[in-house]
Image (cartoon, rainbow, N blue to C red):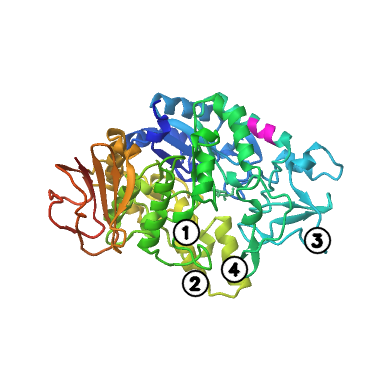
Amino acid sequence: MSEPWWKKSVVYQVYPQSFKDSNNDGVGDIRGIIEKLPYIKRLGADVIWLNPIYESPNVDNGYDISDYRAIQKRYGTMEDFEELLGKAHELGIRIIMDLVVNHTSDQHKWFKESCKAEKNKYRDYYIWKDGKNGKEPNNWGSSFGGSTWEYKDSVGKYYLHLFAKEQPDLNWENEEVRNEVYDVMRFWLDKGIDGFRMDVINLISKRQEFKDGTEIRDNSFASYYEGASNGPRVHEFLHEMNEKVLSKYNLITVGETPNTTTEDAIKYSAASREELNMVFQFEHMHVDYDENRKWNIMRPKLSDLKKVLSKWQERLAEEGWNSLYWNNHDQARVVSRFGDDGKYRIESAKMLGTLLHMMQGTPYVYQGEELAMTNVHFDSIEDYKDIEILNRYHELVDLKGKDPSYALSVIHAKGRDNARTPMQWDNSENAGFSHSEPWIKVNPNYVDINAQKQIDDENSVFNYYRKLIQLRKDYDIITSGRYELILKDDSDIFAYLRKGENETLLTICNFTNRETIFRLPENIKYNSYELLIGNYENNNGIDADIKLKPYEARVYLLK
Ligand code: GLC
């Protein structure tokens, strides 16, 4: 049986609000994406994942949906969307949309009905509970701070919201809710879209006891994870979704699944289970977490990154499938986080791209990653827009009395707006994103870091990513080779093999800003070698020790 197409695909993530503004209102839009399709084609991506463009009050930038079947006006019209889909397909690019169905907006008509004093069928679309001893039903803390429960006078109960209070959680125990979701999915699939990225999909099945959580976060409240992640019916629900909807189409599906182990991921993504194709796990994004979780300025240990990424490569080799990512709209820019966004920005960005793209799985490239766009350092909290950042700042400064400069420093390092500043197209005003003031400020480094400067430069990060993407198409071993970590204890170098029947792919990455020596372990035998890609000029082989330059990366095919 031939492998499914999505195992050889590369996905490009577009955050529409910040991609390209065609009508100069300061907000990116669908016609802007249409204009830039040739750019995405040139990079070589096979699939575009669009962050939510549905009707929404934008409390959480579109992850609070008030109408699943309508395009938000500022992004354009349904005709624009259909044109985008048609033009992408003409170019051989597929489009997947974000499916946000753990929760809706509180402005969704289901929720408005649900809140009415007079009970109707929508009451059970959401999760309503009585308080306990005059307080919330349990001690769960929401992702954006505060309790996960909000009281409604009209109902006389609390409703559950794992995220902002404007994002009430749907009650997946209710079959009618599930059928509504499946109808929404069919609506978009029948338009011809090619799949879904499913927002926090492993949170849909809550443990019905709604017990207090024990994990104290920030010494103030417990996380909802114990009670809500990978819950008792989640696989049943996803299997049902697959049976009723997904299996009827030829799709790519990826579930966002925080707090998920490799065992869980196999259950979600093993073909035999008929659920999803793959999931976004978070373990490698947590290598620089501490007791304040992501809010710190710590550098990860290379040994931790090796351990986590190798574990995922090994455990999902037989069953299940990995998604490979460094970046998305929720993460700080990887070149700033794990690389060097100063002197070695270009080298370290290429190195990080190499490390990820030679692994097994489906790679995701987040807009601007292919240009090595960096984190942004706004001086004032006023310049930030993200609900998570603003809540965190308030908590640190107003509630805990921390120094504002400390709060800003962790926001600079980890805040989600690092990923959300406008795409840097050229060095004209507003980075060529818009002729009006953008909804969020551009990163001032656009003068140097922009697409126009890189597209025709053979040595640019853009063209390096292009080659990485092409290599996956040219060499099956990148899809199928068996992963093996080498030089496990080396604290500077991350190197691994991908073993095929008659050949081996060798990837070598120097994670430091110093020169360091790489010596091929003696048990690795070969007759010939070929350098497939590298981020420095070199003609050297691997017969002798290699003096790797700062952040150097090389990939060899050994036969
Ligand atoms: C996911 C999204 C994130 C959003 C959250 C709530 O993690 O990626 O942007 O805030 O879900 O929908």
**Of helix, strand and loop, which one carries label 2?**
helix
Q: Which residues are magenta?
A: 178-182
Q: Quadrant of the N terminus?
A: top left
Nearer the camera: disc 2 or disc 3: 3
Q: Secondary structure at mark 3?
A: loop
Task: Tell me the CA gap for discs 4 and 1.
Answer: 16 Å
Mark 3 lies on residue? 132
For disc 2, the neighbor class at 10 Å (few under 14, some 14 to 19, many from 20) is some
The amino acid type of the residue labelled 3 equals Lys
Q: Is residue 57 above or below residue 376?
A: above
When the figure is inspected, residue 260 is found, relative to residue 223, above or below; the finding is: above
Q: Main secondary structure of the magenta part?
A: helix
Q: Is the C terminus in the top left, top right, bottom left or bottom right quadrant?
A: top left
Tell me the residue that label 4 is attached to: 218
Between 344 and 294, which is closer to the camera in this rendering? 294
Which labelled disc corresponds to residue 406? 2
Q: CA distance from mark 2 to mark 3?
A: 37 Å
- Do the CB atoms of the residues marked 4 and 3 lie less than 8 Å apart? no
Of circles 1 and 2, the one toward us is 1
Q: Are marks 3 and 1 in contact (CB under 8 Å)?
A: no
Disc 1: which residue:
286
Name the N-terminal-most of marks 4 and 1: 4
The amino acid sitting under disc 1 is: His
In screen coordinates, is 537 left or right of 290?
left
Element assignment for label 4: loop
